[in-house]
Image (spheres, rainbow, N blue to C red):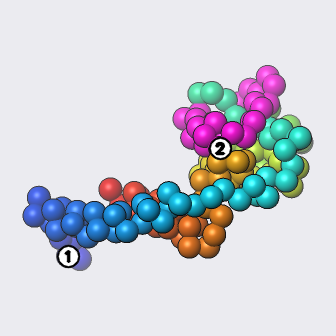
Amino acid sequence: MFLPSITVSTISFLISPIEMLLNYLVPIVSDIKPDLRAFPFKSMALILHSTQANRNFYKILIAAEYVGVKVELAPDFQMGVSNKTPHFLKLNPIGKVPVLETPEGAVFESNAIARHVARLGENNLFGSSSIGHVCVLFMVYLACLF
């Protein structure tokens, strides 16, 4: 199997198209107005089941803080104890953390939770139109390349 080596000239070759795409996308994404209908259950808090020792826990809290969504931490959560209770296993049969308990059901896997939270609240990070959503996803996927 042939794997090309990455050199400075290869990276500089990639930077130019990326800069062009950013110059095109940033004005589109910055004009996106949040969809205020995206968060219909403002009165009920979201409950995050995890320990603070889990590094994936923080990306969820950062997304929640940015969009202005209140996320409560499950009280007295203990790894190895709380995640083996029948209630927790109904939320996530695998028994892994983090898990976000919502009025609509449970969400697990930290990236899925962070994306779900990023769509809520008044500062929706995924845009209110289809093209805005696609532009944001493009930037997320582009960031994963580097």
Whether residue 86 appears in this view of the structure is yes
- Residue 146 rendering spot, x and y as whole percentages: 32, 56
Which of the two marks, 1 or 2, is nearer to us in this view?
2
Q: Residue at x 20, y 76 (%)?
A: 2
- Residue 98 rendering spot, x and y as whole percentages: 68, 42
Q: Is residue 64 magenta?
A: yes
Using residue 114 as the reference point, say whether residue 39 is left or right of it.
right
> What residue range appears in magenta?
54-81
Q: Residue 67: give its label.
A: 2
Q: Residue at x 66, y 56 (%)?
A: 34
Q: Residue 2: give its label.
A: 1
- Amino acid residing under circle 2: Val
Q: Residues within 10 Å of mark 1 (few under 14, many from 20)?
A: few
Q: Residue at x 85, y 53 (%)?
A: 40
**Vertical side of 5 occupied by 50: above or below:** above
Extreme residue toward the bottom, this view: 1
